[in-house]
Image (spheres, helix red, strand yellow):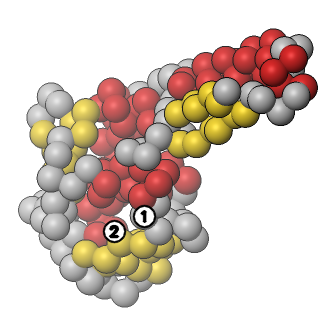
Amino acid sequence: MSIYIEYDPWCRMGNRMFQYALGYILSTSKQSPLFHHGLLNFNIEPNPGTPANNILETKKFGNNKIDFKAQNAQSWNGATLDLSKKEAMLLKLLIENKGEVVTREKILQVVWGYNVYPTTRTIDNFILNFRKYFEDDSRNPKYFHSVRGVGYKYTS
């Protein structure tokens, strides 16, 4: 008998619940004769549709280049930028959802997690920085757009 467990590695709350459930399953199943005779196997993999399976390591747009793995970028004017972990996570989230509005709630959930609630201006300040870093004219953005009352959108 095999048990297939699918999880989303990008969901922090889901991962915590997954860890608890897996701990329970393993602790109870190891007492089972099926486990001891090699008849019970576990196959634990990320959900095939999650971003972890489509890992975006670099992104080029305009004269900009972002290296998510190294957490740095080169801006349109040639300046090299060191990105914070949160900046890299937010950039990746927006770019992976190209053309779609990413709500503030989703940004808070994915980038900051459930237990941390930054001020409402925190996300705005990150987006303003992205415009300074990556836009020729930060007052007329081509890539990072605000959708009033909803969230943000990346276009290229």
Residue 30 higher or lower than 82, as above or below: above
Residue 97 higher or lower than 68, as above or below: above
Q: Quadrant of the C terminus?
A: bottom left
Q: Is residue 39 left or right of residue 150?
A: right
SS for callout 1 = loop
SS for callout 2 = helix
Q: For mark 1, what is the residue?
A: 56
Q: Quadrant of the N terminus?
A: top right
Q: Nearer the viewer, residue 59 or 135?
A: 59
Q: For mark 2, what is the residue?
A: 133
**Residue at horizontal 31%, vertical 54%?**
96
**Residue at horizontal 65%, vertical 30%?**
2
**Amino acid residing under circle 2:** Tyr
Dividing the picture into quadrants, the one containing residue 61 is bottom left
**Residue at horizontal 15%, vertical 53%?**
99
Distance CA(mark 2)–CA(mark 1):
20 Å
Please provide percent x and percent y for residue 141. 14, 62
Please provide percent x and percent y for residue 135. 22, 69
Q: Nearer the viewer, residue 66 or 131?
A: 66
